[in-house]
Image: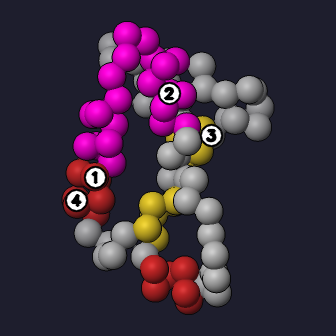
Amino acid sequence: MGPEGEHASDAFDLFVCTPEYLKREGQAATSGRGLLIVQDSDLPRIGAVIEWYLSTLHSADWPAISVRINPVARWAFETHQSGPT
C-alpha cells in the first residue's frame, strides 16, 4: 500500500484465521496484532472489512496513515527500520 498515484509502497502483513484454526493449532492464547480472527473464510466479506478499515484512515500524508495501519497489521520491514515511512 502507498500514496495514491505514486510507485512507492509499504507492505503490511495480516494473518487471517478462524477460531477453529487457532484451536486446531493448539493456540490457547494469541496476540491480536497482525491477526484478524473471522467466523468463516468468506474472502469477499473479509476483503470488504479490511477495505472499510483502511477507508477510515484519513490524513494529509502517507506516513501518518501508515503509522495508523501498523498497530493492526504488521509493517513488513519493522525489524529493519524504526517504523513505516
Q: What residue do we see at 50% from left, 53% from top? A: 14
Say what amino acid the circle numbered 2 marks. Ser
Say what amino acid the circle numbered 3 marks. Ala
Q: CA distance from mark 4 to mark 1?
A: 9 Å
Q: CA distance from mark 3 to mark 1?
A: 21 Å
Q: CA distance from mark 1 to mark 2?
A: 18 Å
Q: CA distance from mark 2 to mark 3?
A: 12 Å
Q: CA distance from mark 3 to mark 4?
A: 24 Å
The image position of residue 65, as x and y in percent, is: 45, 24
**Nearer the observer, disc 2 or disc 4?**
2
**Nearer the observer, disc 2 or disc 3?**
2
Q: Which residue is mark 4?
A: 44
Q: In the shown orientation, is residue 35 left or right of residue 56?
A: right
- The image quadrant of residue 57 is top left
**Residue sitting at the far top:** 60
Work out which quarter of the rendered image holds the C terminus and state it.
top right
Mark 4 lies on a secondary structure that is helix
Q: Which residue is mark 2?
A: 66
Q: Which residue is mark 3?
A: 76
Q: Main secondary structure of the magenta part?
A: helix
Upstream in the sequence, badge 2 or badge 3? 2
Upstream in the sequence, badge 3 or badge 4? 4
Residue 74 visible in the snapshot: yes
Upstream in the sequence, badge 3 or badge 1? 1
Upstream in the sequence, badge 4 or badge 1? 4
The image position of residue 44, as x and y in percent, is: 22, 59
The image position of residue 75, as x and y in percent, is: 60, 38
Q: Badge 4 local density, few (<14 within 10 Å), some, or many (20+)?
A: few
Label for residue 49?
Answer: 1
Which region of the structure is painted magenta?
50-70
Q: CA distance from mark 2 to mark 4?
A: 24 Å
Q: What residue do we see at 37% from left, 10% from top? A: 60
